[in-house]
């Protein structure tokens, strides 16, 4: 079944309706969004200042989430024994549950593993941004911003690898703290801005 083509005016109308709805929600509930954003900034600041604690909590939380996911997958696979792919789903869920339990019970090993996953992500993201900058250099004069993003990714990877394995104890907490902090600040600014635009 093919997806029907949506012409540009219709797409713009749909996008405009979505933006208008988001604006109305921000205006109507600006205080709640501001409080939520401020809480995110506060938690992000604590994690950024105490990144080792943030990393430990993040790893343990991810471990228990994976364990619960594996457990639910096992129960679902057992309740649908005659379904297609039953054994594949069961084995995969069992592995996810075991990995989650190991991460939750051995958070220091989990810190190393998850930091390596983040390093791989930053390398892939940096390579993608560098390739995009190279492709767009003839179309826009703003391509150096994309290349700058790639350089930042590679600098982060270098920073982590230079201090390895000690950096694994604080890297995830710092990244999570900065992400939460900036996301919360953006939410506060958007909510207050929508309130003042009345």
Image: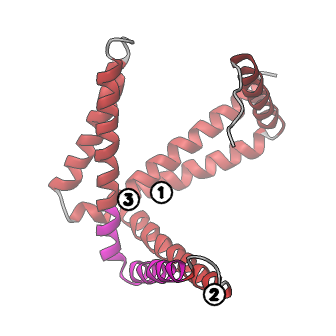
Mark 3 vs mark 1, foreground winner is 3
Q: Is residue 174 left or right of residue 62?
A: left
Residue found at x 66% / y 32%: 190
- The image quadrant where one finds the N terminus is top right
Please state the extent of the stretch shown in magenta in the rendering. 87-115
SS class of the residue under badge 3? helix
Q: Is residue 194 above or below residue 52?
A: above
State the residue lying farthest toward the front: 1
Circle number at residue 46: 1
* Residue 185 in which image quadrant: top right
Query: Is the residue 54 above or below the residue 149 in the image?
Result: below
Residue density around tag 2, few if under 14, some if 14–19, many if 20 or more, within 10 Å: few
In primary-sequence order, the first of circles 2 and 3 is 2
Who is closer to the viewer here, 93 or 99? Answer: 93
Depicted 158 relative to depicted 25: above or below:
below
Which of these two is toward me, 52 or 154? 154
Distance of label 1 from label 2 (alpha carbons): 47 Å
Between 193 and 139, the one nearer to me in the picture: 139
Q: Which mark is residue 81?
A: 2
- Judged by depth in the image, the label closer to the viewer, 1 or 2, is 2
């Amino acid at each position: 079944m093919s997806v029907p083509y949506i012409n540009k005016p219709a797409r713009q109308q749909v996008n405009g309706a979505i933006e208008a709805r988001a604006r109305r929600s921000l205006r109507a509930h600006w205080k709640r969004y501001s409080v939520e954003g401020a809480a995110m900034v506060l938690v992000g600041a604590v994690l950024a200042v105490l990144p080792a604690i943030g990393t430990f909590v993040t790893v343990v939380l991810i471990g228990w989430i994976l364990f619960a996911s594996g457990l639910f997958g096992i129960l679902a696979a057992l309740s649908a024994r005659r379904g297609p792919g039953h054994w594949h789903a069961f084995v995969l869920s069992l592995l996810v549950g075991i990995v989650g339990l190991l991460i939750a019970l051995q958070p220091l090993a989990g810190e190393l593993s998850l930091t390596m996953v983040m390093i791989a992500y930053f390398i892939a993201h940096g390579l993608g941004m560098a390739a995009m900058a190279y492709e767009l250099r003839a179309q826009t004069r703003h391509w150096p911003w994309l290349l700058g993003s790639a350089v930042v990714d590679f600098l982060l990877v270098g920073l982590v690898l230079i201090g390895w394995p000690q950096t694994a104890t604080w890297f995830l907490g710092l990244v999570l703290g900065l992400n939460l902090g900036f996301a919360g600040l953006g939410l506060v600014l958007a909510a207050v801005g929508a309130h003042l635009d009345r």
